Amino acid sequence: MLTSKHMTGMGNILKSDMPTYEAVIGLEVHVQIRTNSKMFTRVAAGYGQPENTLTDPVVLALPGALPVMNKKALDAVIKAGLMLNCEIASVCKWDRKNYFYPDSPKNYQISQYDQPICVGGEVEIELPGSARNIMGEHKVIPLTRIHLEEDVGKLNHGTHESLVDYNRAGTPLMEIVSEPALHSADEAYAFLTAMRAVIVQGDISDCDMEKGQMRCDANISIRPVGQQELGTKVELKNLNSISYVRDGIAHEIKRQIAVMESGGTIVQETRDFDGTTGASQSLRSKEMAHDYRYFPDPDLMPVKVDEDWKRRIKSTCPEMLFDRQRRFLKDYQLPYTITSVLVWDRCWADYFEATVKVAGTSKAQAVANWIVNDFLRELGASKTTLADAKIRPSQIAELIGLIDTGTVLTNAAKEIFSEMFKTGDSPAAIADRMGLKAQPTDTGELEQWCRDAIRGNPKASTEFKEGKDGAINALKGPVMKASRGKANPKLVDETLRRLLAEM
């Protein structure tokens, strides 16, 4: 429920003397599929090449050139559909979407109209405000469809001319269309973040918006709270980052409310949003489906997808992000904040589980702490990625074992980890080389240090004997100081407890 009066946040529900409005938002997300060749020709697909070098007669629509379908692209869309719980059509077909614009040399785009490959589906999103150790409020956003088409070229606008680059034209493009079921800018942001993670973790696309691999258009309308009929929608284009999508939707909601409250009427149109200035302007009236004069492509046969095809692709689908997070919380008892770091990157989640497999489930929290705190810090400082790292899961498991046995102390372990990151050597070898193994302590000497600590801290000693177990920590510090940090913490704890029990 929204009103322009006193609006201070994006998509917030606010009160005023004016009628309150509900925003209704649907998203159309275009994702370039990562394939070696384009959708209907063998010419390479790619980014960053000299202008108009990734072309051939099919891309340029030269007379007599005929399209041939890229099966790998269709596999990728089926995979996306299975991961997003879509119904995979048993038969899909290709259609021509006719329009006259310089970015399409054919004057039409090969797409799918009334028989798309994926129907329905859903994207699970997490709303802001999660607690530390539990997952926050989740919501399922229904999808209308996912279909496959070819991308168009890119127009580069100068001061006095516009130049077209056809390198992008013909690249396999997946369009994911949501139902009008989002109601705030923050929900749209969460939708795109979750959907992008699914596509990236499915190894379908890198979804790099700076390279145009993921683009989003938002259809936004408002209506008085309680009204069932949808309001007039406005399409917002050129939202070239997820943050700009959120900002653009918030801006458009506010603009529409201001129009309604001033007695105006919302016009169905397409608007351009400038993320740097936060302003939008009208581009053109919004096209309807009949404006494109869809008809079946006569050069491409319909495609039949059988159950064996779907089963084969299903076997390659990874565990869904939030399902994996729920499993990590339950099986490993990890804090929510730790799981949120691990599961959003499939490589880190896989690395964590590979390490736990070696170290044992009981060491899962220790493994997670080393990865999230120390490993990520080292990668950030060196400006490298996990793929470049020399540390293997077995080495982290070995380091945790050295700590548990008292062979190395925690502070020394951190030094060892940094050296492991630089060299890839085993933690035991590093501990020997750098002299970081805990030194054996004479039992009599350790006992004397413990007696001195007890005498020097009567308050902590008394509190421990009265049942306050944590009070023993105040006694450990003086012992570790006396041993210059070389005493085995486990042996210190055992000795202190024995002497206190004898008193």
Image (spheres, helix red, strand yellow):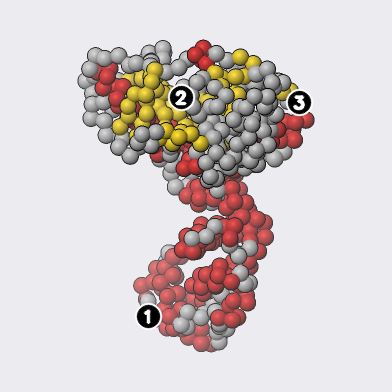
**Residue type marked 3:** Asp
Q: Earlier in the sequence, mark 2 or mark 1?
A: 2
**Residue type marked 2:** Gly
Q: Dot 1: few (<14), some (14–19), or many (≥20) neighbours within 10 Å?
A: few
Give the number of the disc on residue 456. 1
Asked if the residue under mark 3 is in contact with the one under mark 2, i.e. CB atoms within 8 Å, the reply is no
Q: In what quadrant of the picture does the N terminus appear? A: top left
Asked if the residue under mark 1 is in contact with the one under mark 2, i.e. CB atoms within 8 Å, the reply is no
Q: Is residue 83 visible?
A: no
Circle 2 or circle 1, nearest the eye: 2
Give the side of residue 425 with respect to residue 257, left or right. Answer: right
Check the image and report above or below for 313 versus 298.
below
Check the image and report above or below for 98 versus 492.
above
Q: Residue at x 47, y 42 (%)?
A: 210
Q: Residue at x 63, y 61 (%)?
A: 393
Give the side of residue 161 with respect to residue 360, left or right. Answer: left
Q: Earlier in the sequence, mark 2 or mark 3?
A: 2
Q: CA distance from mark 2 to mark 3?
A: 31 Å
Q: Dot 3: few (<14), some (14–19), or many (≥20) neighbours within 10 Å?
A: few
Which residue in the protein does label 2 denote?
26
Q: Earlier in the sequence, mark 3 or mark 1?
A: 3
Q: Assign a secondary structure to mark 2.
A: strand
Q: How many marks?
A: 3
- Please state the horizontal and vertical placement of residue 453, each as a whole percent of the image: 42, 80
Q: Assign a secondary structure to mark 3.
A: loop
Q: Residue at x 31, y 35 (%)?
A: 278
Front in this rendered view, residue 21 or 247: 247
Give the number of the disc on residue 306. 3
Front in this rendered view, residue 112 or 411: 112
Asked if the residue under mark 1 is in contact with the one under mark 3, i.e. CB atoms within 8 Å, the reply is no
Q: CA distance from mark 2 to mark 1?
A: 69 Å
Q: Residue at x 52, y 41 (%)?
A: 51
